[in-house]
Structure formats: C-alpha cells, structure tokens
Image: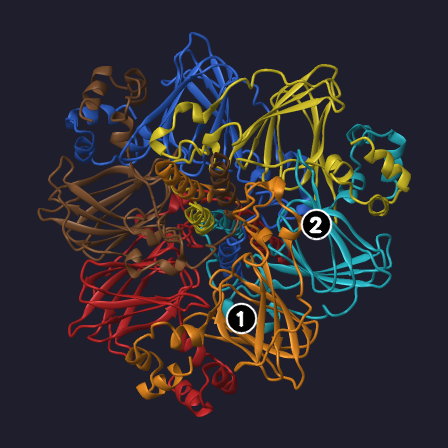
Chain colours: A red, B brown, C blue, D yellow, E orange, F cyan
Amino acid sequence: MASQFLLSGLLAITCSAALASDPSPLQDFCVADSKSPDPKMVKSNDFSFDGLHLPGNTSNVVGSRVTPVFAAQVPGLNSLGISMARIDFAPWGINPPHIHPRASEILTVLEGSLQVGFVTSNPENRLITKVLQKGDIFVFPVGLVHFQRNIGYSNAIAIAALSSQNPGVITIANAVFGSNPDIPNDLLAKAFQVDKNIIYKIQSQF
Amino acid sequence: MASQFLLSGLLAITCSAALASDPSPLQDFCVADSKSPDPKMVKSNDFSFDGLHLPGNTSNVVGSRVTPVFAAQVPGLNSLGISMARIDFAPWGINPPHIHPRASEILTVLEGSLQVGFVTSNPENRLITKVLQKGDIFVFPVGLVHFQRNIGYSNAIAIAALSSQNPGVITIANAVFGSNPDIPNDLLAKAFQVDKNIIYKIQSQF
Amino acid sequence: MASQFLLSGLLAITCSAALASDPSPLQDFCVADSKSPDPKMVKSNDFSFDGLHLPGNTSNVVGSRVTPVFAAQVPGLNSLGISMARIDFAPWGINPPHIHPRASEILTVLEGSLQVGFVTSNPENRLITKVLQKGDIFVFPVGLVHFQRNIGYSNAIAIAALSSQNPGVITIANAVFGSNPDIPNDLLAKAFQVDKNIIYKIQSQF
Amino acid sequence: MASQFLLSGLLAITCSAALASDPSPLQDFCVADSKSPDPKMVKSNDFSFDGLHLPGNTSNVVGSRVTPVFAAQVPGLNSLGISMARIDFAPWGINPPHIHPRASEILTVLEGSLQVGFVTSNPENRLITKVLQKGDIFVFPVGLVHFQRNIGYSNAIAIAALSSQNPGVITIANAVFGSNPDIPNDLLAKAFQVDKNIIYKIQSQF
Amino acid sequence: MASQFLLSGLLAITCSAALASDPSPLQDFCVADSKSPDPKMVKSNDFSFDGLHLPGNTSNVVGSRVTPVFAAQVPGLNSLGISMARIDFAPWGINPPHIHPRASEILTVLEGSLQVGFVTSNPENRLITKVLQKGDIFVFPVGLVHFQRNIGYSNAIAIAALSSQNPGVITIANAVFGSNPDIPNDLLAKAFQVDKNIIYKIQSQF
Amino acid sequence: MASQFLLSGLLAITCSAALASDPSPLQDFCVADSKSPDPKMVKSNDFSFDGLHLPGNTSNVVGSRVTPVFAAQVPGLNSLGISMARIDFAPWGINPPHIHPRASEILTVLEGSLQVGFVTSNPENRLITKVLQKGDIFVFPVGLVHFQRNIGYSNAIAIAALSSQNPGVITIANAVFGSNPDIPNDLLAKAFQVDKNIIYKIQSQF
C-alpha cells in the first residue's frame, strides 16, 4: 500500500506541473471537491453561493467586513480564474491598505460614497485616488497597495471582482506589525524610521 | 520615412510577441490609450467608470440589456484580465444563449429572480441550471453556452464579473442565423435537422 | 488510512494549483496514465496512435465523422498543448457549426473540396468563408463558431491540428436544442424569434 | 515627428508587455499585417494558404524538405498558438536531429514508413523511438532533440502540427558546427571528446 | 501621415494583446530597443551588463543598496521572464519589508550573515524566517512581504534572482507612509490602530 | 479501497489540468513534499538550501561542475518559476553546448574570465558571444544552444538564475551521441555529413 500511495503523490505533482503549459483549462470545469472528481457527478450547487445580499458585520476596529466568494466557498470556481466579494462599510469605516498577491480587482459601489486609491510601485509611489458614488467603478492593478473608506454618515456597500479563484489578501498592518512571530522590533524601527517604542505600540495592537 | 515607419510596425509585432512569455504583467499597469503611453501621465479617471447604478433599456425583443465595463470603457483595465457588466431584465426578459470565447463569468443577483444555466460540451451536453434569488451567485465556465432569464413579474438586475479585459460575446442566434453574409441556408437545415424554410424563417429575423 | 487518503487529495489540489504559474511544462513530458507516473516507465506507445489513414464512418445525418487524437487517445500528449483530428466528409456532408472552447484550429484538405467559414463575435458577426481545394489550409480562431462542408460529389478528407490537448467541442445544435435536460422551450423561442412549435420541432430531432 | 515616433515605439513595448497577463487572446484574432490593423479589414485570405499537397524538393544532402505554414506564411495565425508543416522524405532521407524551442509537435504519416524518435533530457538521455506506418501518429515534447527518417525505398510524406505560431527550428548540426561565426574549435573538441581535426572536418561541411 | 501613424499605434495595441495567448516567446529573443527592432541587428552587448562585483553605496538610513539588473538595464532580457540584483548591506543594515508584485525571488548569500523572512497572507500572517550564512539560499514567493537584514558587524552581500524581467518593488514604508500625495492621515491611524500624531510622525520621515 | 484510490488519481489529473488556466499561483506557495501538503506545516527549511559557497568538483573531462538549486533541492521552489545554479570551471574548463528546454538563463561571473555564447535558431544560426570578467552578466534565451568556457589559468565561478523551477538540461553531445539506446549511426553520419566511423568514434566516448 505504502508504495502505491507514494505513486499517487508523485502523480499529483508530476502531472499538475506539466499541465501548466496549456494556455487554457483542459476541460469544461474542475470542481475542487476531492469527494466527486467525476465531471458527471457535479451539481448546480457546486457552481453557486447564496446570501451576498446580506450585510456583513462591520462592528470591528476598521468598521468594514469583506464577504469572499472564492473557490473555497464555490468549488466550481476552481480553475476559472475569477472570484467575487462583497464589502460592507460602517460610516467612516475603512478597508485598510492591503495587497492581493494574485489578482487585479474591479470594484463597483452599490450604496454610499467611497474614497478609493492605490499606490504605484517604487520609485514613484504615486497615490492614484478618487471619490466614488453609487454606480461608480474603480480598478486596482494586481499586487499594488490599495484601500477604500466610507466617506459618508451612512453605510456603504461595494461588490468587487478579482482575477483569480483565490486572490489572497495581505493586510499591510497585520502582515508587518501583526505577524506570528513578530518581525524584529528594531528592524521595523529602522524600516519606518521611528522609535522602537512606537513600533512596539503598533505591534501591541495586533 | 517609409522604412522608419516599417521599423515601428515590426517592433510592435516582434516585442509584443516575445513579452507573452512572462507569467504576469511587466509593469504596474498599462493604460490602453495611444495618446499617453507614459505611466507618469495616467490619471484616476483612466481606472474609473460611472453610471452602473442606472437601469439599462430593456425595451427590445429579448427584454434585457447588458451594460459592459470592459477595457474599451475603462482603459486602465488593459492587461489586468478582469472586467464587469450590469445586466437588466424586464419581466420574463432573457439574456439569450451565448458564449464568452475568452472569459469565465461569475454573476450575482441584485434584484429579482433569475433562472440561469450552462450546457457542458460534447458528448454530454448536460444542462446545469438553477433558480437564483437576490444575493445568489452562479458561475459560467469559459467558452460554454449559457443563459439567464427573469422568471418574475418585476425587473431583475445582475452584476457579472468576467476573467478577461475583453471577454467577447457570441450570441448563438446572431452568429448562426444572423451572420453577415448568411451561413448557407441548406447547411443550417442539415445542422439543425429541419426544413430550409424554417431556417429561412429564423434567418429572416436577424 | 482515511486521513492519509485525504492528505493525498489535498496534495493533488494544492500543488496542481500552484504549478500553474510556470510559463512552460515542468518536466520533459507527463504521460497521463495514473498507473505509471514514473517518467522512467514511459514507452514509445504512450506517444503514438495508429489508424488515422482509415476513413471514418460518415453514414449519419450530417454526413461527416471526426476521428480525434487528443490526450484521451494519446496519454503522452498530456501537458503539451497540441492535438490532431481527421475529418471525413460524405458528398455534401457537413461538419455542423461548432465551437472549440479551448483551442484554435488549423485545417488542411487532403482530398476533395470544402467550403469553410467562421463567424466573428458581436456586434459584427461577420462570416469569413472560403472554398478550399486539396492542399489548402484554413485557420479557425479559438472560441469562434465555425463549420466545414463538402461541396463536391466525392468524399473529402481533412486533417485538423488544435492548440490544446483537449480542445473540447460544442456542437451548437446539440448544445442549444439537444441538451439534457432541454433548455426551456419558451426561452429558445424568444432567443431565436420563432414560434415555440418550431423550437419544439427542432428539439425533437436531438 | 521624432518625438511622436518615439512615443509610438514606447507604446508598443509598454502595452505588449502588460497584455501578457491575460490567459487568452484579447480579441477574436490579430492578423499580423502592419498594413491592415483593423479587424474589419481582414479577409479570408489572411487565414489561408495553398499548395500543401505539392511535394517539397528533397534533392539535398539530408534528402528531406520541410514546408512550413507558420504565422510568417499565414498572418491570421498570429496569436493563435498553432501552426503546421509538411515534411517530404526521399528514400532513406532524414529530418536531422533538431529542436523546436517554442513548441511541442504531433506528426502523422501520410505516405511511407518513418522511424522517429526523441531523446529525454539529462541525466537519462533516453531515446524513445518507434517505426511509423501510414496513418500512425507520434508526439515530440517541446524543446527535446528529435528526428525522423524514411526507412523505405519510396518517398514518404508527413504532416506535423506545432503548438506555436512560430515554433523555431534549431538543427543541431547547423547550430553547433555551422554557426556564424564558428563555435571555437577546441571547445567543441572537448565537448564531443574528439580530436580538433575531426571537429574541423565536421565544421567544414556547414 | 497622421492616419498612417494612428494605424501603427492601433497595430501595437491590437497585436500585443492577441500575442499574449502563446505560452512561450514567439521568437528567439526580443531586444527592447526601439532603435533596432531587427533581430539581425542585435549585438552581444544587448544581452550583457557589467559591474555587479562592485559594492553598492550603503550609506543611507536603512544601510543597504540594491543594484538591479532588469530589462531596463539589459534590453536583451525583454520577454525572458528573469532578472537579477545585487544587494549590499552595511553592518546591521536592512532591506526593509517590501513586495515584488510580479516575481518570486531566490537569494544566495555571498558574504556575511543575513536574517531573512517572509510573511504569509491573511489570516495566518505567519513569519517564516531563517538566519543565512555564506552560501545559503532562501526563497521568497511572489507577492509576499519579505525582508533581509545583516546580523553581523561586517558587510554582507547577496545575489537575488527574480522571475520577471521587471519584478517591481513596493517598499511598504514608502508606499504606505511616503506616497505622493499622502494616504489620508486618519485612514492610516485607523488601519494601524495608533494616534494620528504617530502616523504624522512616520509620514514626516518619507 | 482500489476504486477509492483510483478516484484519487483521477482527481489529481483532472484538477491539475484545469488549474493551469490561472495566470498566477493559486496560493502563497506549494511545498512539493507529498508528506506535508498542509501549508500550515511548512517550515523555513522547505525554502532554503546551503553550501552554494563550496567549490564543485571539476575533475572531469569537461573541467566544469554545475551545482543545481532546483525544486528537487528546494521543495519550496515548487510553483514559483525560478531556480539557481553554481557553475565551477577548472582552468580552460567548459560548460559544453547545451539547451534548457524550459528556461531562460541569466549568468553572473563571481571569479575568473569566461567566454560565453548562444546560437540563434535557423536559418541564421548566428553565434552571439562575449568575454565576461568578474562582475559581468550575460543572458541566454530559452531553448537556444549556449556554452561557457574558462579562458584563464585560474578557476572560474559563475552563478546562474533560470526562469523555471526545473529548467531541464540537454547536453548536445550526450543527447545526440550518447543517448540510450544510440541514435542510428548512419542517420547521424548523414546529419553531420561525416563518415560513419567518425560518428562511431564520437558515440564511443559517451
């Protein structure tokens, strides 16, 4: 059994590697569900999700909530290079500066007014920002630091589409000041050009 | 001048080709605007679009309207592999069977109830279908025939995200029966196993 | 065992996903044969196929037969992004309007005369068509509706090459009028702008 | 003019780069013809080629002739990732050991008998070889050294399909012993473990 | 002239887009030099660079210096999906937390001892860190926050390879606290959970 | 059990195939270690390697030694599209003409003087060559024949970066004259335009 089992592992690696050379999927779809690998066994629920009309709970320090619809939520998204998310904002709530390492994003405002922006890479570090009203759309290129914030006294709602089934999210504050274990305190003090106590103060929040 | 000009043409082809080998964009973004190739000249409006909250005009034979937000509408989408669209449905309106040759789609219902479905490729040609309510999501894999229809007495609204900056749309009825010039009448009669007069009747609609 | 088994499933998904980022295969080849994952065990027969010189049986309603040589027929094609097919045509036989969701096609005529064509996407829906003689070649771009028909009183033979190991085939008539279950009759009536009875008549053929 | 001209050059590079991030073409097709960039101006001849039924001239030292149908011959192939070639063999003629740096190949024999083979990469350097008869098919993975030879007293004909619009050909003998200028004689002597005079003898043939 | 010129611009966009569909370059190389688009005109200097043995100037606030060898420095790198860099560290110097939006990195230590690390994306935000000695290698996956610091009293030198011709660099501190214009002070205060004055203090450093 | 096991194998193929459509990895990393598929179980050693500062043993017929750091050596490289190697050269040692079927290469000289070069594909077969000193860099495009040789009386050292986790190496002499089994002697005689005895002499070295 053991050797057979190893074979199976080898096969997974070998073949998944090679198939990367095809410029498109190799079948109609691939439902990421290790219990039903057979295309004939897929069902409509493998391609669906419900509840995106429900408000997310924004009672947290940043006053926003992201409800993801990624391959982890919809197995039928597996291999299709697309996903969605709903973002709820309390008044003045923010979606803090973050990066999607594997996707570009296009966002549309369903309710409220949002200030959005992204920062270009070195050396310019230009902030490209805009205030969006209901029905406005904005694009965030892959891998760039971006943010949104509600600039109104009412709740705001946005729908985002992302160019990967699993875009990944790197919230700057959490990754830099809240990692586990911590990034060395003195390294951050030098990186951000401030006293270690300030870095410690920030790290203690996360 | 002529030779210089030819050089420029050659360059465009040669280099665009080669760059296809990089698994990601080669700069932060590339605004598709031949008047400002300089990244330093881009502005926030190159990445935005407005009016997606406005209903599309559905007074047409199918009772639906697609409002695209592709690279043609938002030059900043160029190279980012993502786009969006709003779809409005009159009561019982349909988005007729169509194909996106270059994108998978994920759709969410903002208002109303939609029956949606896609058909797998040969030989199964399985119809995978579901009735969606407000807040429901459904996925349509790249290149497969799919449709939506409003199954209620009120208007319906959906937001779709697509995995290409320019997904392309092939409405089956228009491509097969409304091409310019027509596909030979007798060929279609044999393909659809019906009398030429029926084919002629259908072609005359487009 | 159960938990180990789950591990194996997880590995397959996790790794196949990640490997998609390499712009080329990750080894010389990957024979798609779950019984011999070991590259050292592959044999020349994993890369070969015979009988493509034999005529396909064209005694069917469309008067044509496609003999595919895809990864399902040649396991060594796995990961190489290429495949082939032979198409036989009875006199006046057709290869009905269809789409390859995952491949562009290049076709050459070995015997006879074929009219071929493809239709561009919306809004033009231009039919680009040509009559091919023995030795002529024609190209069908990925995802576009295309067809061939024998315009002579003798048999015709063509060889097609496709840019995927598993191009997929969506025969329009089968997918739209012959899906299982049927696409709702009234939806198709509205899509094709004809009476439900005509749709019913067409559906009843498939 | 000069500055405008430079802008155009910049644009070509900037945008072609970025577009590489899309996993599929960005429009139906892109005819590589700097005289008609407008999709509406393309004609069926941009997608066709004739004469592949004509025998190539094999009166040369290797006794074979390759007739390519690449993007250079068919501008409509541009961007579609596929091409074709006809190979003619005189009795005992060979298609000498060569590599396609940008494509896998699938070959079918139309006439005659061919011995074909490819060699795996280091360290195995396994020769995987087979004798093909009319109607047989064989696959050559991208980047591997491969060859064909006619093992009969009559002419042989094969049709090859390749997974790139411009596969590239590196004939080992020409690249190693016939480059311009020559690879240093003593370096080759050490690489092939033979006397410089033998290397010189081989180089003098090319 | 004007219209011809526009054509050229159109061609650049149209074709660069389409060519993105090929899984590999479309010719041997594409020197990114708008003055010599002709492959026959390239010279060995288009593929070379010198001086990587020279120490970079580390007399700056972070005590490190990156010497890039990207497509901007070596036009022959254009389209090849690879680049290099030398990193010099003064004693205790750091390469502050940063992200490459378009490349994974592999780094080897030539001199000295470095602590290196990267942080995984949400929700884990795990810090994966290691102390490297001369001859050690470490990998930083694409898009993840990573850093290096010299943990010795002597200079340190590292060579990094990156999986893009233009990886891009986003130094977190500069992008978040030093963008131009600034990201709103109160947004950052909420994102990092500290007083605005602290944010102001940090912003004032950049 | 058997059937369950087969399911697992099927899943590996099905899903790895489909995932190839995403233009980037689908998670932060994928350690190629069938014993720990769980991202939470990875450790820093999965991303590291040591000993690249140690000289390779060059006492062999070509007088050089390549020390690879590929995914086989560093499981964390899996999916990241990058790798490294150290190359040691004895005085006048050579890295004989070879091809990487899956990667472009960028090389920098740490010690000594190297003559390097690559040969373009047919029909030009141009040798593009240069003498490199310490600190110089040179680029070798994917799939092209290239070589290096030490042109000094002291040892030489180079570090190479490659654009694949598993670039593959095809040493021309070994693949053409040292394959197992041999490529037919008379075929090579015709390919290289020399007497069979010379071919036999060369083959006997490998």
Q: Residue at x 60, y 29 (%)?
A: D107
Looking at numbered disc 2 in the image, what kind of residue is underneath it?
Val
User: Is residue F205 shown above or below D158?
Assistant: below
* Position in image of residue F107 (x %, y %): 68, 58
Look at the image and tell me whether residue A19 can be seen: yes
Q: Name the residue under label 2.
A: F169
Closer to viewer: mark 1 or mark 2? 2
Relative to F195, F17 lies left or right = left
Q: In this view, does B95 lie to the left or right of A100?
A: left
Could you classify mark 2 by the number of other residues whose Cα lies within 10 Å: few (under 14), some (14-19), or many (20 or more)? some
Q: In which quarter of the image is the C terminus of chain F?
A: top right
Residue furthest toward the left?
B153
Identify whether D206 is placed above or below C1: above
Which one is nearer the viewer's eye here, C69 or B206? B206
Q: Is residue F191 left or right of residue B33?
A: right
The numbered mark 2 sits on a residue in which chain? F
Q: Which of A97 and E55 is in front in this view?
A: E55
Q: Name the residue under label 1.
A: F41
The disc at residue F57 is none
* Comes first in the chain, label 1 or label 2: 1
The Cα–Cα distance between marks 1 and 2, rounded to whole angstroms, is: 32 Å
Q: Which chain letter matches label 1?
A: F
Q: In this view, does D83 lie to the left or right of A47?
A: right
**Residue F197 location in percent, x, y?**
90, 32
Query: For the view shown, which residue lies furthest in the bottom direction?
Result: A197
The crowding category of the residue bearing disc 1, from other C-alpha atoms within 10 Å (few below 14, some 14 to 19, many at least 20), is: few
Q: Nearer the viewer, residue F134 or A17?
A: F134
Q: Nearer the viewer, residue D154 or C17?
A: D154
